[in-house]
Image (cartoon, helix red, strand yellow):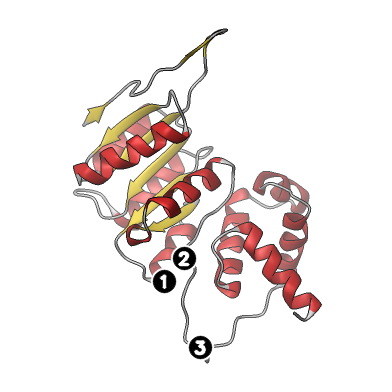
Amino acid sequence: MHVLAPLYCLAGRQGWIQTLKILVSDDHELIRDGVAALLGRLEPGADILLATTGDEAIAIASEHQDLDLAVIDLSLPGTSGLPMVSKLCELLADAPVLVLSASADRHLILKTIECGASGFVYKALGTRVLEHALQMVLAGGVFMPPLRENEDQALSAVTPRQRQILELLAQGKSNKEIANTLHISANTIKNHLAKLYEHFRVSNRTQAVMKAQELVSGQ
């Protein structure tokens, strides 16, 4: 287990700035250090904890349940895959878990979100997409890559509950605010958002709202 605490330190004129605590776990050093460096640019002063296996990631999450974010490779040595994601989401109930994977399988993506993850990034999409995903989940959103389907496969109908969520999204409500308004859990909101992204073949909440508005207006 590799721990950098903090990897980056930042002192402001008025004293020390409160920093985020972030877990990054990947068994490939180049990717692990690259993600840590990107986070250092996005969140100067971030306290970044590094792990190389699923068991190390779980151990760090268990010890540091005040983490603000976890960025995890889905295929790690030891405990990995969906069981690892579920355990991390259980330990870090108040922090987003962003999953990285070499796989773009749509079933796996949806299952990962259903386990409680706040986002899924296909590694081949590159740094710019990863940066966007990090910013989105840190802001309380859910990130999913567009899910490709056969052209002749119709999009599933949007449910009444999903329509309510879209209306609240259009009002600029956060996941937590939507959950409180509809009296359902934040994790349920994540699952509905994942399905909406699939319906509309989009990757974020803004695109989902825009797509829904286009359909309503007949554009």
Q: Where 10 falls versus 129 (above or below)?
A: above
Q: Secondary structure at mark 2?
A: helix
Residue at the image position 72 percent from the left and 60 percent from the top: 165
Considering only order in the chain, which callout, 3 or 2, is on the residue closer to the N terminus?
2
Q: Is residue 26 visible?
A: no
Q: Pick whichever, 153 or 38, lies toward us.
A: 38
Q: Which residue is mark 3?
A: 151
Q: Secondary structure at mark 1?
A: helix
Residue at the image position 55 percent from the left and 63 percent from the top: 194
- In the rendered structure, are the residues bearing label 3 and label 1 in contact, judged by CB atoms less than 8 Å apart? no
Given the image, on which type of amino acid does mark 1 rest? Answer: His
Q: CA distance from mark 3 to mark 1?
A: 17 Å
On screen, residue 32 versus residue 94, left or right, reads left
Considering only order in the chain, which callout, 1 or 3, is on the residue closer to the N terminus?
1
Given the image, on which type of amino acid does mark 2 rest? Answer: Leu
Q: Which residue is mark 2?
A: 110
On screen, residue 107 versus residue 144, left or right, reads left
Checking the image for residue 107, the label placed there is 1
- In the rendered structure, are the residues bearing label 1 and label 2 in contact, judged by CB atoms less than 8 Å apart? yes
Q: Where 11 falls versus 31 (above or below)?
A: above
Q: Pick whichever, 61 or 98, lies toward us.
A: 98
Given the image, on which type of amino acid does mark 3 rest? Answer: Glu
Residue at the image position 27 percent from the left and 26 percent from the top: 3
